[in-house]
Image (spheres, grey):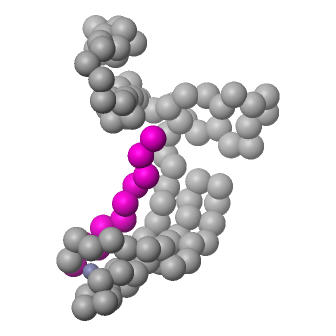
């Protein structure tokens, strides 16, 4: 499992989220600041969930997003895959279908 590290676009130092506000279940406004005291830049932005890569395991999920197009799903799976040298049969099948 990895943790996404926010990086300041001005100086490449780490940033921290000062506050965030959920607008909808899939859209969140965020405000962040650079932790480099010499930089101190602040930003506003957003986090959006656009597609669902796999279904929820619960019986009645509160939100169901559109299923990601094949290429997006394939790239996301490759990014999520842990670093190992074993071939992934599902990737192979999707590449043959695409
Ligand atoms: Zn900075």
Task: Please state the horizontal and vertical placement of residue 73, each as a whole percent of the image.
Answer: 40, 29
Task: Please state the horizontal and vertical placement of residue 41, each as a whole percent of the image.
Answer: 32, 86
Q: Residue furthest right?
A: 59
Tell me: 29 left or right of 35: right
Q: Residue furthest left?
A: 11
Q: Is residue 33 above or below residue 37?
A: above
The quadrant holding residue 83 is: top left
Tell me: 78 left or right of 11: right
Q: Is residue 98 above or below residue 57?
A: above
For image coordinates 49% across by 46% down, the residue present is 50
Q: Quadrant of the C terminus?
A: top left
The image quadrant in which ligand 1 is located: bottom left
The answer to if 36 sits in the magenta stretch is: no
Q: Which residues are magenta?
A: 1-10
User: Is residue 74 in sight in this rendering?
Assistant: yes
- From the viewer's side, name the closer residue of 77 and 48: 77
For image coordinates 53% across by 70% down, the residue present is 29
User: Is residue 71 in sight in this rendering?
Assistant: no
Task: Please state the horizontal and vertical placement of residue 90, each as a whole percent of the image.
Answer: 39, 12
Q: Residue furthest bottom?
A: 38
The answer to if 9 sits in the magenta stretch is: yes
Task: Please state the horizontal and vertical placement of residue 86, each as a whole percent of the image.
Answer: 30, 14
Count of all numbered marks drawn on residues in the image: 0
For image coordinates 50% across by 31% down, the residue present is 53
For image coordinates 57% across by 72% down, the residue present is 20
């Amino acid at each position: 499992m990895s943790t996404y590290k926010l990086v300041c676009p001005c100086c490449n130092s780490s940033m921290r989220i000062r506050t965030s506000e959920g607008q909808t279940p899939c859209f969140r406004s965020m405000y962040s600041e650079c932790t480099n005291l010499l930089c101190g830049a602040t930003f506003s932005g957003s986090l959006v969930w656009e597609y669902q890569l796999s279904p929820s395991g619960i019986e009645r999920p509160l939100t169901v997003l559109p299923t990601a197009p094949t290429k997006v799903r394939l790239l996301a799976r490759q990014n999520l895959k842990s670093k190992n040298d074993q071939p992934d049969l599902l990737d192979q099948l999707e590449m043959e279908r695409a």
